[in-house]
Structures are given as C-alpha cells and as structure tokens.
Image (cartoon, rainbow, N blue to C red):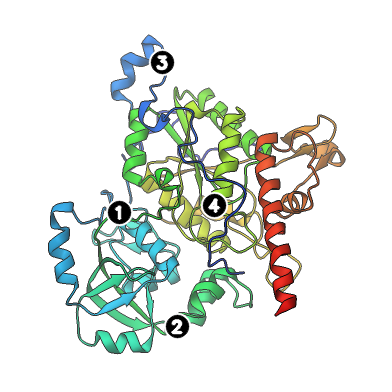
C-alpha cells in the first residue's frame, strides 16, 4: 500500500488549511536523562539552515497551518497574579479528590489538547461524545471528540457536595489542584460507556479495570480552572510541551508542514523508515521544511508496556545514533492516558494533534489497538483505524497519512517496506515479540533497532528480572 494523502490537498501542494495495573514507580538501572534528548537545547537554540530563496519567503511561513478546534486554543491555567485569591476561595468549597489518571486528564484539558472543551464533560457533552464521537458547537460547527473526558465521584462525595455549584479539586497527595465551577452531577452508566467506547464489555480491558470499574456511580462536569501548570517532577517535565509551546516551537523553526507520529512502544528501524519516508515525500510535494513531531504517549499504559522513562531513554539513543535527525524532529510527551480503544481512540489521538498545530498525521496498522482480552485475536480489525480517520466528523482539515507496512527483510538484513511478491523473505516482529526478545536477552535480527536503543530495553528487563528475583525469597519466607 503506497503512502497516500487525502484528496483535498491542492494540486500544487499549497495547503490553505485553517490556521494489568501499574500504580507505583519502580527504580530501574536505566537512568532518566537529566537534560533534553538533543546534544544542545534544540527546543530553544535551533535555527534551520536555509537558502537565501527560502529565507526571503520565511516571513510568510507559519507552522500553525491548522486552527485549533473551536478557533481558539484553550488555556485554563490561572494567571499567577490571581492564584492566591483562587486558593483562598477554594478553601471554602467541597472537595473532590483526584486519582493519578484524573490528574492526567486535568493536565490534558488545562493545556488545550481537548479544545474547545473547557472542563470535565457535562451530560450533554458526554452523550454527544459517547454516541456521536463529536460535539456540536453553538455556531453549528462540528468538532471531533471521540472519547468521553469525565470525572467520576462516589455516593459519599456526591452527598458532601450537596447543592454547591463549585468544588475544589485535590491531587492524589491532597494538594490543591484547581476548581470545577458551575458543576452538573449525573449518572455514570458504566456498562453503556464501556460498550460504546470499546465495542465490548469483555473482562480484561486495561483502562476499564484501572479506571472505570472502581470508579463511583456519578459523573461531575463543569468549567475547570487549574491553579498552576501540572508537573510530575519525574525528570521528564521538560519534554511535556503544551500545544501552545509546540506551536511556538514550530514557528521558531519556520516549519511549513508538521507531521505527527504517536507511539507507546520503543522505536525500531521500521518506525524510523516510515517517518523518514514521510518527510521525503513531503519534500517531494514541495514543502521546504517539514518537521516531525515524535509524540510518545505519557499517561496511563497497561502493565506490560515499557514505562515512559525507559521509552524516552530509548528514543534518545535513536536520535543520538542518527536514525532520526534531531534538526528536523521535535520530541515531546503527549500527556493523555491510553484507552486501547482502537478506531474510537485513534480519533482522539489525531484530534489532539490538530490542537498542537500538526496538519499531517501518520496512522498505521491497528492504531490504539490490542489483543482481545479473552480470545486469541485482535480486538479490532487492523485496517479500520485508518479508514475511520479518513471519514471521521471534525477531522476533515487534518491530512491523514496511512503508512506502508514495514517488516524485516531477511535478504537485505534491514527493515524495509513489505513486498508481497517475495513475502517469504519478510519477518514481522510485533511489539510483543520485541519485548520477548529483550526480556530473554535474545538479540533481534541485525538492522531491527539501533544498538544503543536495544541496550536500553535489555537493561530495563534485566533490572525487572533482578527485582523479581529479590522479591521471590520474601514471598517464600512469608
């Protein structure tokens, strides 16, 4: 399958687009990098090398080729000058305590990833999202919103709120995070939510077991105010660029196309092949400075996924080894939790990148999918994600880039695009197989992943096995 661009791109390529549980952190042998991936701070100092002809036109080039949904990027962080007053006001309000994943959603909403959403959904927004995968704005326009972004509370919290119209939001450790105003409380029908989001109510869905099953029977929606930017103090906050910061960085680099690649796995050379090939094709289309947004998901992931700090270290090795070019790549963490909801969730992933300023989105096989939790098959048809993206309401202004299938070429000894005429020469190595290799200490075929990146994974699984070995005697003793 060749790389294709949606048909609404102009003939001369001049786009006129509108502007299992993982609840604790574990110490691993792999160290978090204390500085950005780049050898110098490229997010501040980088200035692209351009010819005189390109420089003369650079003043007209803006990366914000695509407007945020709703036309204005939402920013719900209270100005520093007003924080004291809001803090005092919040002290007299009923309190709602957030879980770790609730806090991730506060982060997402407050920075504008879900623009034009301005808080946790009230019932009318929830029903539109759940049943239509989109929201209708007051002016009649449609924006995509395929995942309900909601805050659950239990009976006791509902009783404590009573008739109050505003509530204070406390973080998992009890610190004041923000305020939810003009609230609405409504019933949390968990079965309906699960069935419509995942297309199944089978046991074993990671997000359902971690978030929805233990959640309360009520949802509370309202307008969000966050007292200060959300930080995790995990050594990775410098990677967590907001949509506003990303748009500024794209403009600083004088980008004329932004292509986003979402991932929750380590990068192998097949991924790099797809990203580099996409840039080559954009250059052939006439773009002068296309920039890759390498955007690993940083929120909740299932227990057997590689943790974020290890993935970020692995990504750094990919850039250090020159597999991807740091001068044309921006690495940033996408703060959203992962649902593993296939075609429904991939719309959310694409929509959020619109708000960050990306006008191209790379989508591959089975995006946001997973194996069926109780049967030996994929939960979703692997081709449906890219098909749904090409038809989804509210995503018309985003250019979807379905990528060609990459696999390991056993003849050429490298990752290459799959050639059906010699299918027997290709080896498909899934994420599960990759993790199995690393866990067992077995090396993958030469050319599958850069050596530095592979070493990071091996060290991580060795540390995991060492930790399990030390825990075993304690279990036997008890």
User: Of 97 and 161, which appears nearest the observer?
Assistant: 97
Check if mark 4's residue and mark 1's residue have beta carbons within 8 Å.
no
Marks 4 and 1, the one that precedes in the sequence: 1
Q: In 3D space, how far apart are the residues under numbered discs 3 and 2 (Cα atoms)?
A: 56 Å
Single out the mark in the foreground, 3 or 1.
Answer: 1
Marks 3 and 1, the one that precedes in the sequence: 3
Q: In 3D space, how far apart are the residues under numbered discs 3 and 4 (Cα atoms)?
A: 35 Å
Task: Give the secondary structure at mark 1.
Answer: loop
Task: Give the secondary structure at mark 2.
Answer: loop
Q: In this view, does 335 lie above or below 217?
A: above
Q: Is residue 428 visible?
A: yes
- Number of the label disc, if any, that sits on residue 229: 1
Marks 1 and 2, the one that precedes in the sequence: 2
- Number of the label disc, if any, that sits on residue 50: 3
Is 400 placed left or right of 257 in the picture? Answer: right
Marks 3 and 4, the one that precedes in the sequence: 3
Q: How crowded is mark 2: few (under 14 residues within 10 Å), some or many (20 or more)?
A: few
Task: Give the secondary structure at mark 4.
Answer: helix
Q: Can residue 12 be seen in this view?
A: no
């Amino acid at each position: 399958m060749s790389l294709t661009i949606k048909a609404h791109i102009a003939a001369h390529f001049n786009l006129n687009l509108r502007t299992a549980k993982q609840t604790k952190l574990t110490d691993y042998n792999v160290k978090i990098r204390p500085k950005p991936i780049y050898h110098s701070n490229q997010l501040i100092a980088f200035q692209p090398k351009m010819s005189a002809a390109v420089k003369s036109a650079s003043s007209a080039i803006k990366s914000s080729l695509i407007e945020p949904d709703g036309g204005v990027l939402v920013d719900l962080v209270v100005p520093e000058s007003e924080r004291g007053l809001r803090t005092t006001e919040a002290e007299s309000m009923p309190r709602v305590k957030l879980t770790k994943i609730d806090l991730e959603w506060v982060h997402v909403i407050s920075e504008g990833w879900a623009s034009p959403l301005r808080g946790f959904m009230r019932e009318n927004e929830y029903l539109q999202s759940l049943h239509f995968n989109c929201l209708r704005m007051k002016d009649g326009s449609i924006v995509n919103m395929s995942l309900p972004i909601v805050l659950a509370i239990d009976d006791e919290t509902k009783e404590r709120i009573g008739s109050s119209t505003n509530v204070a939001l406390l973080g998992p450790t009890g610190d004041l995070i923000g305020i939810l105003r003009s609230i609405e409380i409504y019933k949390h029908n968990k079965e309906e939510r699960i069935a419509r989001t995942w297309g199944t109510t089978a046991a074993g869905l990671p997000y359902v077991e971690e978030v929805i099953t233990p959640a309360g029977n009520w949802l509370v929606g309202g307008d969000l105010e966050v007292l200060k930017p959300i930080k995790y103090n995990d050594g990775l906050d410098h990677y967590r660029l907001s949509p506003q910061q990303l748009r500024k960085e794209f403009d600083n680099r004088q980008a004329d196309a932004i292509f986003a690649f979402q991932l929750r796995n380590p990068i192998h050379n097949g991924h790099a092949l797809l990203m580099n090939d996409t840039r080559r094709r954009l250059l052939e289309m006439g773009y002068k400075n296309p920039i890759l947004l390498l955007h690993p998901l940083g929120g909740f992931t299932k227990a057997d996924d590689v943790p974020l700090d290890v993935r970020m270290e692995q990504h750094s090795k990919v850039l250090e080894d020159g597999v991807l070019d740091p001068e044309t790549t921006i690495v940033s963490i996408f703060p959203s939790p992962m649902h593993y909801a296939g075609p429904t969730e991939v719309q959310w992933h694409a929509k959020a990148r619109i708000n960050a300023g990306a006008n191209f989105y790379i989508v591959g096989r089975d995006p946001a999918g997973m194996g069926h939790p109780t049967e030996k098959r994929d939960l979703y048809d692997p081709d449906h994600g890219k098909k749904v993206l090409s038809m989804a309401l509210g995503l018309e202004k985003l250019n979807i880039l379905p990528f060609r299938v990459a696999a390991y070429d056993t003849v050429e000894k490298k990752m290459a695009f799959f050639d059906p005429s010699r299918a027997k020469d290709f080896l498909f190595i899934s994420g599960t197989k990759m993790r199995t290799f690393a866990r067992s200490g077995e090396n993958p075929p030469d050319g599958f992943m850069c050596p530095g990146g592979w070493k990071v994974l091996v060290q991580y699984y060795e540390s995991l096995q060492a930790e399990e070995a030390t825990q075993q005697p304690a279990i036997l003793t008890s």
